Amino acid sequence: LVLLDVDQLHVNERVPKQKGQIREGFAYIWRDRDLRLVMSLMGVVATLSFNWNVLLPLLAVHTFHGTANTYAFITTVFSLGSLTGSLWIARRQVMTSKFLARTSVLFGIGTALIAIAPNPAAAAAASYVTGATGIAFLSATMTNLQLGSIPAMRGRVMALFMMVFVG
């Protein structure tokens, strides 16, 4: 934060609230091929894979017949993967569509590996990969959406992103 050049920061004008802004946000995303692709990919990935808060406790207790310690072990390794993914994405200069596609595929592979893991250690190892690629995908998606939209539409685009992500 100390290295930030405050003179290069600028505040965008606030867009006044009006009826139909969400509809305009949908139309804006639909017209822009890149934004439409990123949002569609996020919709698929979020629907199929971003449900760890529900699945990991069930995996630990019902599949591996473990305890809270089993769950804590798997989620700790998942979190370490997420930290690694955050550091990985922070070093990147450009977030291309190819990068999004690759991280989403790796995220899916990690998820599949967790699903077929024979024991908690294997599930934890797969969760490291899943955590790293999941956070990289999520961060790259948000970066693409924010940098790819004009300032007047950025809030609407991100509101729609949250609707897609959270469901």
Image (tube, rainbow, N blue to C red):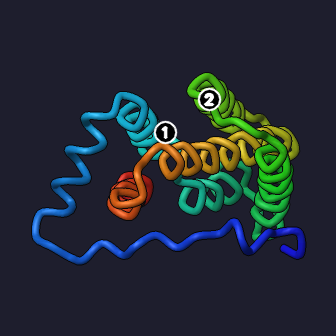
The amino acid on which the numbered mark 2 sits, given as a three-letter code, is Thr
The residue labelled by disc 2 is 96
Q: Position of residue 15 (x, y in %)?
A: 30, 72
Front residue of 153/104: it is: 153
Question: In which quarter of the view is residue 104 placed?
Answer: top right
Q: Residue at x 24, y 77 (%)?
A: 16
Question: In which quarter of the view is residue 60 placed?
Answer: bottom right
Q: Is residue 112 visible?
A: no
Q: CA distance from mark 1 to mark 2?
A: 17 Å
Return the residue found at the far left.
19
Tell me if residue 127 comes above or below residue 73 in the rendering. above
Of marks 1 and 2, the one in the foreground = 2
Tell me if residue 104 comes above or below residue 165 in the rendering. above
Locate residue 87 relative to residue 62 in the image: left or right: right
Q: Residue at x 56, y 27 (%)?
A: 97
The residue labelled by disc 1 is 45
Q: Position of residue 41 (x, y in %)?
A: 45, 34
Tell me if residue 136 comes above or below residue 163 in the rendering. above
The amino acid on which the numbered mark 1 sits, given as a three-letter code, is Val
Q: Is residue 93 visible?
A: yes
Q: Quadrant of the C terminus?
A: bottom left
